Amino acid sequence: MRELQDRFGRSFPYLRLSITDACNFKCEYCLPNGYHPDGKPRFMTLDEIRRVLHAFSTVGMRKVRITGGEPTLRKDFEEVLQLAANTPGVDTIATTTNGYRLAEHARAWHQAGLSQVNVSVDSLDPANFQRITGDSRFDLVMKGIDAALNEGYRKVKINVVLLKGLNGGELPLFLDYIKHQPVDLRFIELMETGLHHDYFQAHHLPGTVIQAQLERQGWQLDPRGPDDGPALNYSHPDYAGRIGLIMPYAKDFCASCNRLRVSAIGKLHLCLFTEAGIELRDLLGSDDQQEELIARLHAALGQKHQTHYLHEGDAGATPHLASIGG
């Protein structure tokens, strides 16, 4: 079966699959007022998720990241992991989580097939963590990271959204943390979304600020691997952990794009910041519709743009990152 490829020669072995847009944290940059159901169609069933996974694996998907919202809020999260693990061709199963259930379930999820976990930790200061996330369970989240490391996950990453005036000065804290911890820190530049223009204006901190500090301290840019996405990864011989920078406003950020997104209500998103989604759910009701589903995926890739337009102030149709899985 022909692999997915767009007009610009980019292939897409990586699927970010959202299974819910609900979240129990209230991060200022995403859902500051908490999650409120909008009354629209509910999230995909396990059978629908299985059909999405099978279709994408047939056209070259090798890595799937289960996202949300907070994906572990779904009671069948472990079953979703098992579905992914049983999908032919998939060799990497990852998730992005706020980590509140990780300490309790790290072993079971690993046994179900989860091999990589990204935990959102926007501050290593408990009070500041609570200010940013609206949640006081900092210690529980950090215990979850320890549990994943002890369990032997292939990769454990910490996601940090850079926020001017909130955590922009915490680089020394994070560096101390990864001195002896084999964790990848990922500093993510705040991205403007439809509902958060004022917040973006107040708190956007260019990733180049952190990049310059790292380079002054001897951090070296790692060679890019064949399946690497847009992140720039840095290593230092004195540190057990690495640092990744995700800077979506940088020139040529989209040149190495290798991922597609499917929302929790079954829409394909070619970019985090473009169209309102291409409907797939009408083709997820039966195994007999797989060929038609795959044909729609190929047709959709013809619509993918070469780049997003964030640098022009156009955040597209995304209201907030929880709506399609970040």
Image (cartoon, helix red, strand yellow):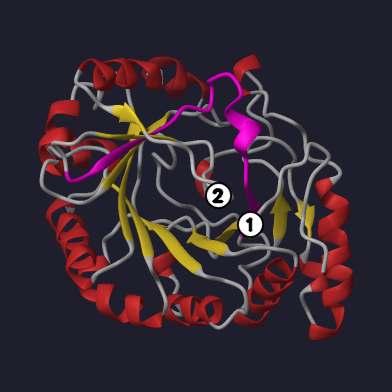
Amino acid carrying label 2: it is: Asp
Mark 2 or mark 1, which is nearer the start of the sequence? 1
Which of the 4 image quadrants contains residue 146? bottom left
- Density class for disc 1 (Cα within 10 Å; few <14, some 14-19, many ≥20) is many
User: For the residues marked 1 and 2, what is the alpha-carbon distance in whole angstroms?
Assistant: 8 Å
Residue 244 part of the magenta-drawn span: yes
**Image-based side of 149 in relation to 196, left or right:** left
Position of the N terminus, as image quadrant, is bottom right
* Residue ID at (35%, 60%): 117
* Rendered image: mark on residue 227: 2
Residue 300 drawn at (x, y percent)? 84, 50
**Helix, strand or loop for disc 2:** loop
Q: Is residue 179 above or below residue 2?
A: above
**Region of the chain picked out in magenta, as a range:** 240-263
* Residue ID at (54%, 42%): 229
Q: Please report contact status of discs 1 and 2: CB closer than 8 Å, yes or no.
A: yes
**Image-based side of 146 in relation to 298, left or right:** left
* Rendered image: mark on residue 107: none
Q: Is residue 221 above or below residue 322?
A: above
Which of the 4 image quadrants contains residue 313? top right
* Rendered image: mark on residue 13: 1
Residue 194 part of the magenta-drawn span: no
Residue 46 drawn at (x, y percent)? 60, 80
**Helix, strand or loop for disc 1:** loop
* Residue ID at (19%, 27%): 171
**Relative to the observer, which residue lies in front, 3 or 198?**
3
Amino acid carrying label 1: it is: Pro
**Relative to the observer, which residue lies in front, 126 or 244?**
244
